[in-house]
Image: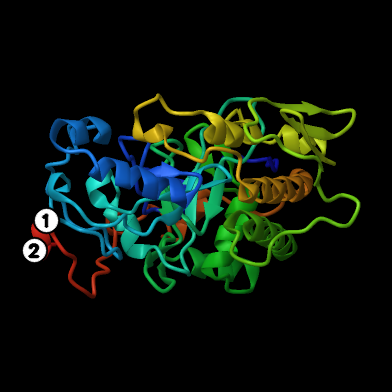
Amino acid sequence: MPSVTHDDAPLLADLMPWSVAPPRTGRGWPTAPDAASLGARWDALLGAEGPDREALFGSTRSRTPRSAVPQLPGQSTGTGRLSRESGPCPEPVRVLHGPFDEQWLIPDHRLIDAARPELWRVADGRQVFVVEQTVVPGAPGPVVLATSLLPFGAGRGGRIRPLYRRPGGLEPNLAPGLTGHLATRLGRLPDALDVLAWTVAVARPGPHGRAVPLTADPEVWERGVELGRAMLRLTRRDGERPKLPGGRRPYVRAPLPASPLELRYDPDEETLFLGEGRISPVPPHVWDFEVGGVRVLEQWFTERTGAGEPGTLEAIGPASWPQSRTSELLELLTVLALLGELRRRQVELTVREAPIGTDELRAAGVLPVPEAARRPASVLDHHEEGPEGQFALL
């Protein structure tokens, strides 16, 4: 993490004041690494009746097949009670299930204990979600990740801070007056993506939360923003597919088995083994890449090989390892390899001269943040369907 010579760095919680708790499904089967499994699970659920449907569903205090709930914002799923449902599976949507783990979700409010509708209302092609990661003392890895996908990690991770408070990239979720003060000190007006890029590049653990050292040095600021934007291109995954130079690109050297049960790594050969399958070259820093003290590759593999208990909806999945999954793995290896190289530049990025601390931000009136900035904006420009087809009263 970047080093600083002061203890006055402002907190992410103040610089991006509006945050939302992570969504929580309450059951595992509405998410899966592939969309086809979700359709099969939905059909199996609706093929059961009465107590059998409820047993498959996995009832909680928040949701049962008889729960009456409104539609998720931006979705067209049914609002009748699931116990009477007979229609096709809603179209799955891509979500971020965990760090660097893109999966699919059935976007049906009846299946989700805590969907956080305020996040769905501002999710669009312009939005970027900043997800706080678990801080493990002494462990390497980022303390925040940014994604264009709706974060839906079954309650894992910390709070979620959207970059914009309204759809269409409107009303940045930044402390009022922050960009104006930065413009005065830097001699140029940063936009919301500049501030986000800087944050991703320099955020670090602090005694009171995730800290974001700020600089008044234009040259240091530009280096940090450039680095952060390079990191965002990899974590947002909304541009061209990332590529490594020839000779460094990972390839499948031995075919992956139909059902790989073991993942291991040989640092001497720079080879990743999935059972008898081999992928190389894989640099050691890719295998060692951790978030929240957990190896990203091991967690990704576990999510795709840990079969659910027989007779449950979670047990419904591909009979063998899909070819598309190998392509996803190769892309993940590329992303981690490129991010590892950028992390070396992070270490070199320091904020030692002319830091902008909390005392200065208080003197400028940027802090404390008004309470209204910590609450969601009113973004509705259309009706949302409530339970049983009624209009929701909001």
In the image shown, does 121 or 2 lie closer to the viewer?
A: 121
Where does residue 304 sit, x and y in percent of width and height? 55, 36
Along the viewing direction, whichever of 79 and 284 lies nearer the viewer: 79
Color style of the picture: rainbow
From the viewer's perspective, is residue 58 above or below residue 39? above
Image quadrant occupied by the N terminus: top right
Left or right of 245, for residue 121: left
Answer yes or no: is residue 206 visible: no
Q: Give the percent coordinates (x, y) of residue 363.
A: 46, 56
Can you tell which mark lies on residue 390? 2
- Left or right: 196, with 343 as reference point: left
- Which residue does the image show at 77% across and 58% down from the upper left? 243
- Residue at the location (76% across, 43% down)? 347
Q: Quadrant of the C terminus?
A: bottom left
Disc 1 element = helix
Local secondary structure at mark 2: loop
Q: Position of residue 53 (x, y in %)?
A: 20, 36
Above or below, 344 relative to 223: above
Q: CA distance from mark 1 to mark 2?
A: 6 Å
Asked if labels 2 and 1 touch by Cβ distance under 8 angstroms, the answer is yes
Q: Which mark is residue 387?
A: 1
386 left or right, relative to 294: left
Q: Is residue 65 left or right of residue 205?
A: left
In the depicted structure, whether residue 317 falls above or below residue 338: above
